[in-house]
Amino acid sequence: MKILLVDDETVVRRGLKAMIQNAKFQFEVTLEASTGLEAIKIVEQHRPEIILLDIKMPGLDGISAAKQIKEIAPQCKIIFLTAYAKFDYAQEALRCKASDYLVKPVNPQELKLTISNCIEELFPHLTISHAQQVITNAITYILENIQKPVTLDDVAERAHLSPTYFSSLFRKETGV
C-alpha cells in the first residue's frame, strides 16, 4: 500500500511522515510532492491508495489537484490538510469526495484514526491484490528453487503465513 504526502512545506511533509511511521502503518512506499501538479504526476505513475493533500499551495491548489486525481484514480482516499478552518474549504473538500479534512497542526492521534478509517474502507480491495501478490511471490520462489526440495513449510515461511493458511489461500487463488 502506498501513501502520498502533498504539501508545499518540507517541514510539514517530514512531520507527517514521522507521525505515520510512529503510528506503525505498513506502507510499502511513502511518496512526497510539493505541488498539485507534481502530485498528479505521482498518482499517474504510482497509484497511491491514500493521499494527504494540502488545500492551499502555490500554482495548482489542493482542491483542483484532487478533482484531477479523482479522475485518474477514483478509488484513492484523499485527506485534506489545511491551516485554515474555513467552512467553504470544508464544503469544497466534500464536493471532491474527500475522506476527511484535518486542520494543521495535525494531531497525531487524529491522523492515525483518519488513516485507519481509510485503510478499513480500502481493505476489501487490498485483500484481493495482496493475496494475488503472495501467490505470485510463492510461485516465483518455487520456480527459482525447483532444483532443491521445497516444502509447504518453506514457501509459507517465505510468505510470512502459517502453512495451513497459505495452503488454503493458494488453493482458493489457483484452484490447485
Image (spheres, grey):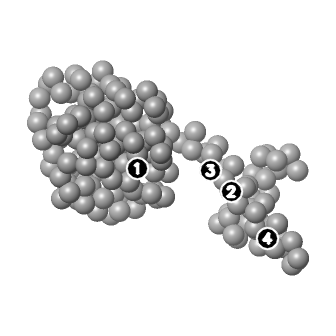
Q: Which residue is mark 3?
A: 130
The label nearer to you, 4 versus 3, is 4
Amino acid on which the number 4 mark rests in the picture: Glu
Q: CA distance from mark 4 to mark 2?
A: 15 Å
Q: CA distance from mark 3 to mark 2?
A: 6 Å
Q: Which residue is mark 4?
A: 144
Give the number of the disc on residue 134.
Answer: 2
- Disc on the earlier residue, 1 or 4: 1
SS assignment at label 4: helix
Amino acid on which the number 2 mark rests in the picture: Val
Which residue occupies 88% across, 50% down? 176
Coordinates of residue 122 in the picture (x, y in percent): 50, 39
Q: CA distance from mark 4 to mark 3?
A: 21 Å
Q: Residue 61 lies in what quarter of the image? A: top left
SS assignment at label 3: helix
Which residue occupies 20% across, 36% down? 59
Amino acid on which the number 1 mark rests in the picture: Ile
